Every structure is written in C-alpha cells, then in structure tokens.
Image (cartoon, grey):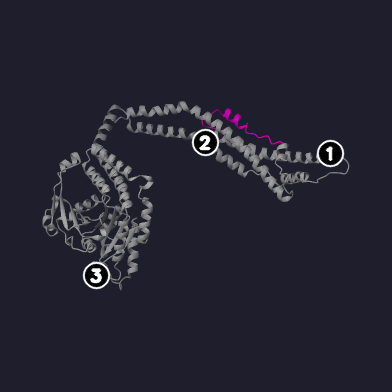
Amino acid sequence: MKSELTIAKETSVEIGNDEGLQGGTSQDEMLAAVQGLLAQVEQTGDGEHGKKLRQLLAKAQSERLYLAFCGHFSAGKSSLINRLCGHMLLPSSPIPTSANIVSIVNGEAGARVIYRSDETSDQAQGVGEQRSETVPLDELAEHCRNGEAIETVEIRYPIPFLGEHAALLDTPGIDSTDDAHQLATESALHLADVVFYVMDYNHVQSEINLAFTKKMTEWGKPLYLIVNMIDKHREQELSFAAYQEGVREAFASWGVRPDGIVYTSVKVPDHPSSEWSKLDGLLGQLIELRRPLVRLSLEKSARALAAAHAEKMAERNEPAKDAIREQLAASGEDLDAVQAEYAEAGAELARLESLPAELQAAVRKDVAAVLDNANVIPAVTRDLAHAYLESRRPGFKVGWFGAAAKTAAEREQRLAALHKDFASQVETQVARHVQQTVKAKLEGHGLPAGAITEAADRISVELTPEWLAGQVNEAAVFGNEYTLTYSKQISAEAKGLYRKEAYAVSDELIAALAAALQPRLAALRAQPAELDARLAG
C-alpha cells in the first residue's frame, strides 16, 4: 500500500497547481462550464440534478474541503467521527436523522437544522424555499425526532484541525435493507472531495462494502478505507499482516484500489495495531491540499451529474422516441436503414477527407523503407570505388613517358568503371523499387492508372561521372577507411535525391487526387442535411 504522503503528492500532481485544473482549465472557466450545465439542466425541468449543481457551485465558490465519511451503520462511524472531533457531537445509536447528511465545521458550538423544501416546487423550478432553525447542541437530538422532514444538519464546534475551510461530512449508514439510506449517501457524493469508507473489522469483505466502494470509485475521487474495531482481532487465530493482505486482495478482486487503508479502534485507542496518528496525519495532509482537491472534485462531480442528467433525460424521452418510431413505421420510412445510411455517409466523408494525408504518410513511409533497405554499394562496387580513389591520391602516376596523359586516362577509366556499376546498382536497387512503391500506394483511389504510371516513371535521378568525382574530399587521407566513408556518402546522397524526387511526384499525384475528390466530398457533405430532414424526429 502506498504511503499517505506519497498519495498526497500524487494527488497534487494529478490536479495540477493552484492556477487550474487538469488540461489547464482555470477555476473561472470550470465554474462557467458548470453554470452553463446548470442552465441546460434547469431548462429541461430536471430539478433533482439542478439542485445538486447549485449546491456544487456554492461549495466550489466557498472553496470548503469536504471529507466525507460513509459506511455500514454498525461500523462505528459516528463514534470514530466523535473521536476525531474530541467531543460527542454525533449519537452512537441510530436516530431518525440517520437518513440525512450531517456536516461538522470548526466554530462556536451550535447547530443548524435545514428542513426539506417543497418537492413539487423543486421538480418544477429546481428551487424551493427551505426553512432552517438554529438550535443548541444539547437540544439537537430532540429537534431531529422527525427525521423525514430534515434534509441536512450543520454542526459547529471548536475543532482546530479543520481550520476555516474544511468540514467533516457524516453520511447515512449503509444498510442493505434500507435503500433510502444508501440513496441518501450516494446523493451526497457530489459534495464530497475525499471519501473515507468505514467498516467493521468482522465484516470488511461483505458484499455491500465491496459493491458500494466499487460504485464510489466510479466518481474518480480519492478513496480511503478505514477498518474500525480492530480490537476484535485475535493474533493467535490469524496474524494481523495476513489479515491486512486479505483486505487488500478482497477489494482488488472487485477492481477497488483505494488510495490508502487505515486501521483503528475507538474502544481501545492505544491498541498496538491502531493507526490514529496515521489518520490524523492524513487528514492534515489532505487539508493542506484543499484548493486543488476542491477543484478536482468540482470537475469530477460536474461530469458525474451531467452523465446522470443525460441518463434521466434518455429515460424520460423514451415514450416520445417510441411515438416517433411508430410514426416512421406508419409512413413506410425504415428508421434503421436511414440511420445506417447516415452512418455510412459520415464514415465515407471522414475517409475521403483524410485520404490525401493518409496516402502521403503511407507513400513516405514505404519509400523510406525501400531506401533504407537498398544496398547500392556491394563489395564489387566498393572495390571499384577504392580503385578510383587510389587514382585521386596525390602522387598517383602511370608509366614513365607521357605520364600525365596516361595518369589522366587511367583515372577517367576507373571513374567510368565505378560510374557504370554504381548507376546500375542504383537503377535496380532504388529507382525501380521506388517507382513501383509509389504506383502501388496511389493506385485504386480514383486517379487514372496511366497518369500514375507516367508520373511514377519520371522518378529518376541522373548520377553522372562528374557527380561521383565531385563527392571526393580532396583533403581526405586516402585508404581503406576513406573508401568506406566515400561509399556511404555517395549511397546516402543518391538515396536522398531519389527520396526528394519520389516525394515531389507523389505529392503532385495526391494534390490531383484531392482536387478530383471535391465533387464527391461536396455531395457527401450535403447528404446529412437531406438525411436530417428524414430523421427530424
């Protein structure tokens, strides 16, 4: 398991610096995007997700970090939170408020109870008048007897480690027999920046824990597991290290890889395996990362709410879609056929639009492969090059009488022999293969075969004896080493000239193809408009 310090650093890297979110999106840009989403959601009359988006915007603007605690109702979550706060703020036994969200912040002791607004108004307008009441902490339980009427409870108490911009979020206890509690917890996840899932030592691997944490990972927010009540552990039955390994393996088998696992005991806080100091340190590190965590959470929550809204709208629109399908069937229009035609036209348009660039890349790739593999300096050619270079060496002479004329003639003869062999090698190993490659890649795409052949046959470079002579470095030390250098040089230069010619010819042909495709592209671009008219529903 990664250390919490490592996790904190990785989280900081993932969300970037304080100036922006992933991809360079600034805080203002993200808020504007969420506000735009809110406008769209409210326009559809989706009060449920509109309300959550407004809560999300208000939270983001306050930049308060929410550390959410979830878990099975019997896992000791409330007792654990009380231990962290240093005061009995939450009752350890279930009360009617257990289906509501409780937030705890640092401040003067007191509580505020927020009652549910009119549900009809919420659905119709996305807003509703909410009544709230401020009460002393010792009277909170009495005020919360009618839990069904309460939406959230805000508790204030002097908790220095939370500072001014952090809060603990206590969500309803998860109970496999009470869907309302689970839905209430899920409905609060858009406000959570970091999730701590609390479990009873004896029930860590229960399906409800594995399934719920799996669902929480889909939000993409930091997730930590807290295994509570470890005072139940019996070392003589199973080593604690083996127990920890079993926990990791169980969640990994469900695809849940938490950012950390912490082991605690409220009943026996000084238990040798209890990690209170580790949990305290982790909370401190996360609070230090408040700004980037809040911004990351804003993006993740907005994406999740947008997806949930889209799913809701899709379900709502199913009756209308069914009616349109019936209308199309009555008119004789084959919806599937039209949609297939639409998809086919779009695919063909995309293919033809990208065809010139794809052909250019393919030609260049294959020409480069031909040139790289061509051996135009076999041993015989290299020997001829060596003989010619010997004739260029200072002091080279042939005969005693008429030495200058004989030397020049010998030099020309050796150059001619090298040129004849080298030109032949280039013709058979390079020119023909390059011409065939260009033809093969460009045929079958709409250009006349004759035009392609005529253009490809023009790919030719005249390598004269004078060109070979001009490649010699007069200042070189002539010998076997320079023969190798010279051979590599004339090979590379010749290949470079053919590469340039091949690219020029293929680009010319591809430009002609692009021009020839324009009428077809124009027709395909017009086709969706006609299909849209038939698919107006």
Image: 57 above or below 341 = below
Specify whether residue 175 is in view.
no
Residue at label 2?
359
Give the crowd class for mark 3: few <14, some 14-19, many >=20 residues within 10 Å: few
Q: Is residue 70 above or below residue 61?
A: below
Picture quadrant of residue 259: bottom left
Image quadrant in which the N terminus is located: bottom left
Rendered image: mark on residue 259: none
Which one is in front in this view, the residue at disc 2 or the one at disc 1?
Answer: 1
- Is residue 307 among the parts visible in the rendering? yes
Is 310 situated left or right of 504 in this image?
Answer: left
- Would you name the residue on which mark 1 appears? 405
| Left or right of residue 499, residue 69 in this image | left
Q: Which residues are magenta?
A: 443-464
Tell me which amino acid carries mark 1: Ala
Q: Is residue 459 magenta?
A: yes
Instruction: Say the numbered circle drawn on residue 268.
Output: 3
Instruction: Label the magenta part by its dominant secondary structure.
Output: loop
- Location of residue 466 by image quarter: top right
